[in-house]
Structure formats: structure tokens, C-alpha cells
Image (cartoon, rainbow, N blue to C red):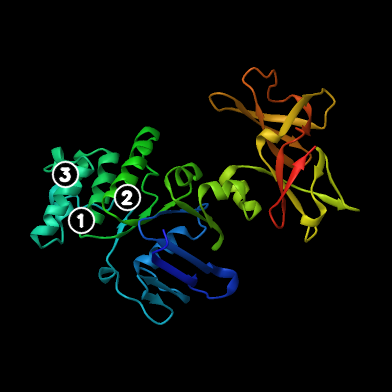
Amino acid sequence: MTDIHLELNNISHAYGSKSKNELTLNSVNLSLHRGELLGLLGPSGCGKTTLLRLIAGFEKPLKGSIAVDKNIISSGSYLLPPEKRGIGMVFQDYALFPHLDVWRNVCFGLGSRNEQDRANWLLELVGLKPFLQNYPHQLSGGQRQRLALARALAPGTSLVLLDEPFCSLDVEVRHRLRSVLSNVLKSCSASAILVTHDPQEALGICDRVAVINNGTLHQCSTPAELLSKPSTPFIGKFVFQNNIININFDKSSLITPYGKVIVKPYLLKTKPESLMFDEMSLEIIPNDKGKATVKSKEFRGSFWIARVQIDDQNLRVWLSLDAEIKAGDRCDVRFISGKYAFLYPGCISCILQ
């Protein structure tokens, strides 16, 4: 996918005060390829929804520009009205007309016969043809979300913005709608941006994922690239729930309380400050006089995840189902030799020992 459908160039935004410390978005550069589903992932309040509002035309950037098919639609001095952008939007609360049935909700604002034919095709595509005369309150949450998606695409929209569309749905419906979303977008040859704070959702269905925190874009890559080469510790911590610890670098040796770190010296362009590793890189050694304490265990179906505290550090550790370790136990923690980890800054691959 090389055809760029949407491009954000050096976008900054602020509500009220324009001081650098209060920017909601800070110099964000991002592109969406035609036919791509791009995930916008980050914690609550990081700027995800603000970015969608800028693309939709509900907000004006402080600086930078937004272009669709190389045509500027927003800049610091220009704002194309939302209704002229040809961009569909699906909101968290669906934003359906409660006094209109399914058919009239989808056809609202449509004029030509071709557009109504498209609406009919979309309703069949999302499985709502049997409910044409039902009103929104007569539909389930999943059906209302599918109706909102069909309405956003009905005018022939080729770009759709989805603001956490599955957040209020139960797990089973959410998983089912993820596949529906991908199929519908592909059938319509549409590009889309999906805002979510759920890493599994973004990694599971998106072609690429852009990770944002505090208004700053940390990385935009495929799910596989995020996993194999996370550019910042935040990505490993938020997206993959990895462990991150500070390290001491003393006379070319990397020292940690849990074991040694082996790295090729020529890779160290700068002094490493932190080490990131997953929950399967540690093992718990029961010890009544150990320095660590098992604070809790979380059941994950085929294994446990233990939260272990040592001094002011909290670590996540994988445990087998038959592990005889319980909350409150004292223990020691050490690296499992041969596991891979990353040093920062620089995302430098290393081996634990």
C-alpha cells in the first residue's frame, strides 16, 4: 500500500492556552494508505480523539496541515467545513436518530437512487436487512454499532473515522464486530482510522498501529514491528505490558538485581538507562527470607501472571498453573538465561543471563 489517502504533517493542537507544556498534540506526522485500517492506540487523555476531531474538521490545528488525496483540508489558517470533507465518523455512542428506523437512519441525507441502492447493499452487508423498520432502541448494542457504520459509509465515503466504537459492548459482540468491520471496509474499498485504548483490539485487526502518549506519536508500525522493535519503553509497557527497570552501567558491565545483561559493545551508541523484558523472562524462587513479595496472582486461562514487588519495583512474572506460589509468599526473582530483552535509549537487543 503506497497510495497515501490521508496525510498529517507536523500537526500541533491546544485547547485554550498555547504554551508548549499544554499542547494536546505536539508535531504529529502520520499517513494513512488507501484501503488501510490504521489503529490509533494510547491511554485515556493522550490526544487520540482530538486527532480524529482535527481530521473530521471539528477542531482547527495550531500548526501543521492535514491533506486528503494531496488536497489540504486543514491548516493553521484554513479549515474546510466537516460536511464538505467526505469523511464518515462513527462515535462511541452511535449518534443515531432515535425517531428514525434503520432504513431512514442509513438513508438520511441521501438523494440519488444510486446512493439508496448503496445503502440497501450496506445493510445487507452488515446483516441488518431483517430490521429495516426497527428503531434504534429496538436493536442490540452490536446492531446499533453496525447501523452506525453503514450510515457512515452510505454516502460513498472512502474514509471513515471510528472513535472507540466497541468500548461499550460485551466481549463476544466486540470480537464478532472486529471481523465485521474489516470485511465491510474491504468490501467498500474504504480506508479507516480506529481509535482505541485496547492494545489487543488494535494489534488484532489493524494493518498498522500508531501509538500516542501525552500528545506525542511514539511509533507507527505493523503489529509485528511493534513487537519486535518497540522504539520507546512506553510502547513495551503500555502495548505489551512488559517489565521495565532502571539499570547501572559500570565499566562496560550492565548490572541488575536479577542477573546479567549481555550485549555487543559496538551496539551501545549511548549509555543505557533502562531494560525492558517480558513476563516470561523471569522466574520466581521461593524463599522465606527473600527480598521480593508476591502481591497478587491473575488467572489467564492456561497460566498465571504474578505481580511481584521488590523494593519499589513491581514486576509481572509468568507462572504455570501448577505453580505452588500464592499471594503473600516471600521469594527471590532472577532472569531466565537466554531470554531476549531491549536496552533504552536506542531499542538495543540484548540477552539475559
Q: Residues within 10 Å of mark 3 (few under 14, many from 20)?
A: some
Quadrant hosting residue 179:
top left
| Above or below for 154 versus 175 | below
> Which amino acid type is shown beneath numbered disc 3?
Tyr
Q: Residues within 10 Å of mark 2 (few under 14, many from 20)?
A: some
Alpha-carbon span between mark 3 and mark 2: 15 Å
Indicate which disc residue 154 carries: 1
Q: Farthest residue to the right: give it.
A: 251
Helix, strand or loop at mark 2: loop
From the top left corner, tell me how far across and down residue 26 is, in percent: 54, 69
Q: Is residue 257 visible?
A: yes
Counting residues from the start of the chain, the first of labels 1 and 3 encountered is 3
Q: Number of labelled discs?
A: 3
Indicate which disc residue 93 carries: 2
Question: 218 or 265, which is in the foreground?
Answer: 265
Indicate which disc residue 135 carries: 3
Counting residues from the start of the chain, the first of labels 2 and 1 encountered is 2
Which residue: 38% across, 37% down?
A: 175
Q: Single out the mark in the foreground, 1 or 3.
A: 1
From the top left corner, tell me how far across and down residue 212 is, in percent: 53, 57
Quadrant hosting residue 109:
bottom left
Q: Single out the mark in the foreground, 2 or 1.
A: 1
Which residue: 80% across, 56% down?
A: 266
> Which amino acid type is shown beneath numbered disc 2?
Asp
Q: Is 161 positioned to the left or the right of 301 in the image?
A: left
| Above or below for 228 versus 174 | below
| Above or below for 188 versus 179 | below
Q: Quadrant of the C terminus?
A: top right
Counting residues from the start of the chain, the first of labels 3 and 2 encountered is 2
> Which amino acid type is shown beneath numbered disc 1?
Ala
Helix, strand or loop at mark 1: loop
